[in-house]
Image (tube, rainbow, N blue to C red):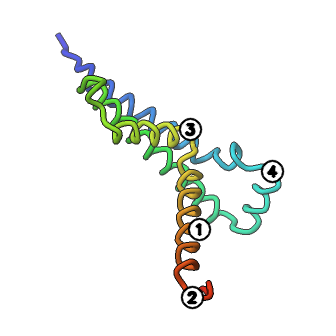
Amino acid sequence: MIHINFALHGEVLYIFAAMFSSTILGLSARYIFWTGAKREDEKAAYGWPGMAYQFWFNFLGSAIGWVCFAVFLRAFFELKIDKLTFVHYIYLMTGGMGMAGLLPQALSIVSSATGDILQRMVRAALPDNKMPL
């Protein structure tokens, strides 16, 4: 009789779903999130290297989301719900954004906001509010 390890098969199916979903999102994110005019402008400006970059960027964002969600699921099933910490919910949120294809955009917004805050802090600290070059 053949013994089937269902936990192993579940992990293999999860990895397959993650890779398949990330690949589909990587290939189609330009069509999902961009309008036709923006898509054509980007294609004309960057050609296939730009499309390869967008594939990799969106594929990686989705894959990171799947990994974060797997970390949350493992903690969720191993711990009691009252033992979950704030970090576990950060994994859940990151996983959800990544699997939905929103992680690259969210990271871009956070990066831009951080840059704006730092720029305002430097301007406020300098005499006469002059920014160095």
* Point 77% across, 65% down: residue: 44
Q: Is residue 64 above or below residue 107?
A: above
The mark closer to the camera, 2 or 1, is 2
Identity of the amino acid at label 4?
A: Gly
- In terms of depth relative to the viewer, which is nearer, 50 or 118? 118
Residue in front for this viewpoint, 128 or 66: 128
Mark sitting on residue 36: 4
Q: Residue 97, image x and y in percent?
A: 52, 41
User: Is the residue 15 above or below the residue 111 in the image?
Assistant: above
Residue 100 - label: 3
Count neighbours of disc 3 (C-alpha within 10 A) and say few if under 14, some if 14 to 19, many if 20 or more.
some
Viewer-nearest of discs 2 and 4 = 2
Q: Nearer the viewer, residue 52 or 103?
A: 103
Q: Is residue 4 left or right of residue 26?
A: left
Estimate the x, y position of residue 42 in percent, counting from the top left.
73, 62
Q: Which residue is mark 1?
A: 116
Task: Check the image and name the residue furthest to the right.
Answer: 37
Residue bearing mark 2:
127
Q: Earlier in the sequence, mark 1 or mark 3?
A: 3
Q: Disc 1 or disc 3, which is closer to the eye?
A: 1
